[in-house]
Amino acid sequence: MLEVINLGCIRGDRRLFKDLNFSAKPNELIELRGANGSGKTSLLRLLCGLATPAEGEVRWQGKNIRSLGEDYFRDVAYLAHQNAVKDELSAIENLRISSAVNGNNLKGDQAQQILGRIGLSSQQNLPARSLSAGQRRRLALARLLTSNAKFWILDEVLTSLDDAAVKLSREFIGEHLKTGGLAIIATHHDLDLAADRIQRIELSK
Amino acid sequence: MSAHSLTSMFGWLVWRDLILAWRRRSDVLATVFFFVIVVSLFPLGIGPERETLRSIAPGVVWVAALLASMLSLGRIFGNDYQDGTLEQLLLTPQSTYLIVLGKTLAHWLVSELPLVIVAPVLGLQFGLSENSLAIVIVSLLVGTPVLSLVGSIGAALTLGLRAANVLVALLVLPLYIPVLIFGTGAVQASVNGASPRAWLLLLAATAVLSLVFAPWAASAALKISVE
C-alpha cells in the first residue's frame, strides 16, 4: 500500500538521509527511530506530502502521492508536533470544526462521545486556551479518531501525555491497525504495541 | 468527492475563520479604527476648505483603505501557521486554491467589508455629495476584494519570516497601485460630475483577474512557506 523508493532529504545544505526504501501493508506499524535532528519529522512530512522530496518518491496504492494530490489527503491523518488546536475555540468546537473542514461532519453527540473517550468530557466547553499541554495533546488525538484515514502519520505521539493517556493512545493505535489501518510513528519511547507486523526504521545521523 | 461536500467544507472553512475573528474582535476593530482615524486626520490637518477637501477625498479614502488592509494581511495565514492548523488545512481533501479562496473571503468579510460600511460616513467629512458617496461605496465594494486577494499572495510569501509585516507592505503595496488608480479615478470622476463607469469597469476587470490568479499564486507560495 505504501512504498518509499530511494527517498532522499536535504535540509538547507545538510543531507539528512538518502536511498531510503521501505514498504508497508495494512495492519502494519512502522516505528521510526533516530537521534534528535536525524530527520524523523522531515521524513514524516515527506510522507504526508507537505514537503517535496529532493530525490526518490513516495507511492500510495501504486501511485506517486504527488499525482494523487487531494485524493491522498483523504487517506492520511497527520499528528504533528504542534497540536493544531485553536485557542479561541472550545474543545468541542475544535473537534467539530476541524473534522467538518476535513469533509466529515460530526454530530454534537458523536463529538461528545469521542471527547468522553479521550477523557475531556468535563472540559468540552472550555476554551482550548485554558487546557493543559497534555489535554491539548489529547484533543489532537481526538481529531485523529474522527478521521477515516487509513494511514496515520504520528510525530512523537506521546509527548506530554500522562500514563492513562499513553495507555489510551496505545489502544487507539492498536484498534486502528486491527481495522486495516497503517501507521508510522516517530518515537523515542517503546510503544509496546500489539501489532501483527512491526517494522523498525532507524535514521542515523 | 461530491460537489455538496466540497461546498460544505468550503463553508466550514469560512465559518471557522469568521468565528475566530469574532472571538478576537479587538484585532478587527483595530483595523477599522485605524481607517477611521487616518481618514479623519486629513480634514483636521488641511482645514475646512470644501473644494480642497472634495478634491483630495477620493485619494485619502483609498490610500487609507490600502494601509488599513496592510494591517490585517498578516492574519490571513499567520495565526494558523503558528499553531499548526495551517498544515492540517493543507492536508484536507480540498484543493489549496479553495482553501486560499475561503480564507481570503473570510478576510474580506472581516477586515474589508467594515471599511466599505464606514467609508460613506467618513466621506461626509469631505463634503462629498450623495452621488459621490454612492460611488465611494461601489468602488470600495469592487476594489477591496482585490486587496484581500492580492494581499493573500504577499501574506503567503512572507509566512514565518521576521519583519513579515514590513515585507508584506513592500511586496503588496506596489501591486495595489492599479486598484488605487481605478478606485480614486471612479470617485474623482463622480466628484467632477463625469461618469465613473469606465473606471468601475476597469476595477471590476482587475477584481476578476485577481480572483482567478491570486489564489493560485498564493497557494503556490503557501506550499513553499510551509515546506
Image (cartoon, rainbow, N blue to C red):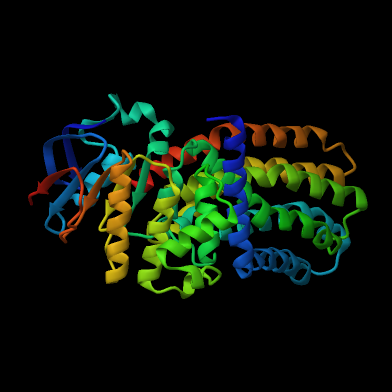
Left or right of B132, for residue B171? left
Asked which quadrant contains residue A152, the reply is top left
Left or right of B185, for residue A133? left
Q: In the rendered view, would you say A57 is above or below B139?
A: above
Q: In the rendered view, would you say B105 is above or below A89?
A: above
Q: How many marks?
A: 0
Q: Position of residue B166 (x, y in %)?
A: 47, 59
Left or right of B54, for residue A113? left
Residue at the spot x=58%, y=52% of the render? A107
Q: Residue furthest left?
A: A204
Q: Residue furthest top?
A: A62
Q: Position of residue B207 (x, y in %)?
A: 66, 36
Asked which quadrant contains residue A178, the reply is top left
Residue at the spot x=81%, y=53% of the render? B55
Residue at the spot x=35%, y=39% of the render? A150
Quick check: can you spot residue B63? Answer: no
Q: Position of residue B31 (x, y in %)?
A: 64, 64
Q: Position of residue B193 (x, y in %)?
A: 90, 42
A107 and B53: which is toward the camera: A107
Asked which quadrant contains residue B124, the reply is bottom right
A162 and B226: which is toward the camera: A162
Q: Quadrant of the N terminus of chain A?
A: top left
B190 and B114: which is toward the camera: B114
A174 and B174: which is toward the camera: A174
Quick check: can you spot residue A59? Answer: yes
Residue at the spot x=61%, y=58% of the render? B67
